[in-house]
Image (spheres, rainbow, N blue to C red):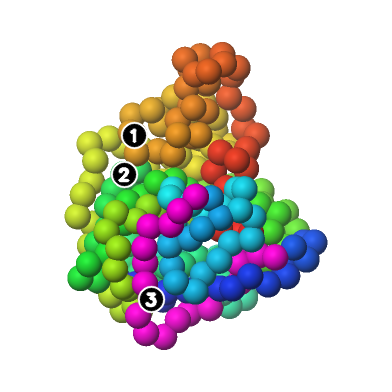
Amino acid sequence: MRLLSVNTGPLRPGPPDGRPTGIVKQPVVGAVLVAPPGPRGTVALAGDAVGDARHHGGVDQAVYAYAREDLDRWERELGRDLAAGTFGENFTTVGVDVTGALIGERWRIGPDVVLEVSSPRIPCATFEGRMGVPGWIARFMAAGRPGAYLRVVVAGEVRAGDPVEVVHRPDHDVTIGVTFRAMTLEPELLPSLLRADALPEPIVERARRRTGTGSTSAAGTATVEPSDVGGLDA
C-alpha cells in the first residue's frame, strides 16, 4: 500500500458558476507538509486550498484520499483518462481499500504522518461541473466509491511513493462505504453508524435523529445536507 500521488491546488474560478474553488489539483513533486488545520475553510496540506469555507475543510475534512483502482474503474466506465487529482483528492492511493476503511481507522503514511478516517466525500455541484458529466452526482452516489476524508493525528511530511500502513482498526463494522450509503441512498442504515465513535458530530446527530434520540425526532431522509458532510469540492 502506498501513495501514488500527493495533489494540491490553489483557488481558481470553477464550475458551475465561476466561484473560487480548489477542486482542480495537480501532483506535487517532492515533500509536502501535512499539519492539523484550523476551522472550516482551512486544509492540512501546504499549497492546498478550498473556496467554500462554510462547508469544506476543517479538522474532519483535513485530507481527501481516493484509490487509483477506483479511478481506473471510472476511466473504463467513462471512456476517458482520469489523472491523479481529477476528483480533487489530495492523496491518490494504490493498494488501499478506501471504501472498506473503517471510521476511526488510522493510517501511517511515510515515517511520521498519522491520519484517521473520518467520513466519506459527498458529491456536490462543483464536482459535477468539474467532471462535465450530466447526472454525475446521482451516478457517483449509485457507484458507492466515494473516497475518504481523514483527520491529522500526527503531522509531518509526505511524498509520492510513501508507504501507507493501517496501524489501528476499531472494533466495529462501520466503513466508509456503509456511511456513504447511509448518508445518501439508504438512510435506513443511519442508526448503524452510531457504532462508530469517530464520526463527525453532524453525522452522529443525523443518525440520532433517525432513531429519535437526537435534538429532534424527525426521521432521516435520503436528502444530503451539505453542512453535514461537505467536501473539498469548493
Please tell me which residue lies in front, 144 or 233.
233
Q: Which residue in the protein does label 1 denote?
A: 196
Q: Is residue 135 above or below residue 224?
A: below
Q: Residue sitting at 56 percent across and 73 percent down?
A: 9
Q: Quadrant of the N terminus?
A: bottom left
* Separation of residues labelled 3 and 2 (CA atoms): 24 Å
- The three-letter amino acid code for the residue at tag 2 is Gly
The earlier-in-sequence mark between 1 and 2 is 2
Q: Quadrant of the C terminus?
A: bottom right
On the rendered structure, is 195 left or right of 141?
left
Q: Would you say residue 4 is visible in this rendering?
A: no
* Separation of residues labelled 1 and 2 (CA atoms): 7 Å
The disc label shown at residue 104, or none:
2
The disc label shown at residue 118, or none:
none
- The three-letter amino acid code for the residue at tag 1 is Ala
Residue 174 is one of the magenta-drawn residues: no
Q: Which residue in the protein does label 3 denote?
A: 32
Q: Secondary structure at mark 3?
A: strand
Residue range (magenta) = 20-39
